[in-house]
Image (cartoon, rainbow, N blue to C red):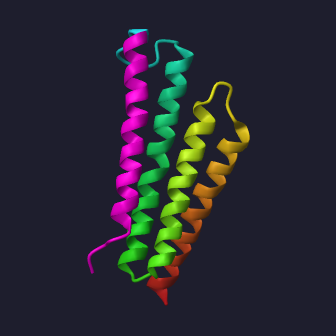
Amino acid sequence: MIPTVTPIYAGILALLLVYLSFKVIFRRQSAKVSLGDGDDSMLNKRIRVHANFVEYAPMGLILLLMAELQGAPIWICHILGIMLVAGRVMHAHGLAAQPQIVPLRKNGMIITFAMLTFAALANIGHAIF
C-alpha cells in the first residue's frame, strides 16, 4: 500500500517547520546572535515555538503513517492529520503571540494530545487484535 494521506499532512507540517525556522533565523540576524538566545527574549520565544513544534509533529506523523499503513479508513486518517496540523498551528500561534494567547496555546496542545492518544491507541489496538 502506498500512503496517500500522510504525505499531505507531512508536506503541510514541513512548510510550517520552514516558516518557524525562518522566524528564528530572521530574529538571530536582527539580534546578531549566532548560538543560543543571547538573552534576547523574542529570540528565546521563537526558539521555543520552533522546538515545541519539532517535539510533537514527528511522532504525530509517524502514528498517522502507521495508522494509514495498517489500513485505517481514509476519513479517519484525514481527521487525525487535520487534528495534528490544527493543534500545531494553534499552539504555535498562541505561544508566539505577544502577549501569548493562552487559550489558543492550550487548545492547540489539547488537540495535539488527543490526536496522539487516539492514533496511538488505534495503532496498538490494530496491531494486537
Residue 123 located within the stretch drawn in magenta: no
Q: Magenta stretch? A: 1-30
Residue drawn at 42 percent across, 26 percent down: 24
- Relative to 51, say whether 99 is above or below: above
Question: Where is residue 100 shown, x and y percent of the image?
Answer: 67, 31
Specify the farthest residue to the top: 32
Residue 15 located within the stretch drawn in magenta: yes
Position of residue 94 in the picture relative to residue 65 (left or right)? right
- Relative to 7, say whether 21 is above or below: above
Specify the farthest residue to the bottom: 129
Residue drawn at 37 percent across, 23 percent down: 25
Question: Where is residue 106 shown, x and y percent of the image?
Answer: 69, 46
Residue drawn at 40 percent across, 17 percent down: 28
Question: Where is residue 7 shown, x and y percent of the image?
Answer: 33, 62
Looking at the rendered image, the quarter that the N terminus falls into is: bottom left
The answer to which image quadrant residue 59 occupies is: bottom left
The answer to which image quadrant residue 4 occupies is: bottom left
Question: Where is residue 97 shown, x and y percent of the image?
Answer: 62, 30
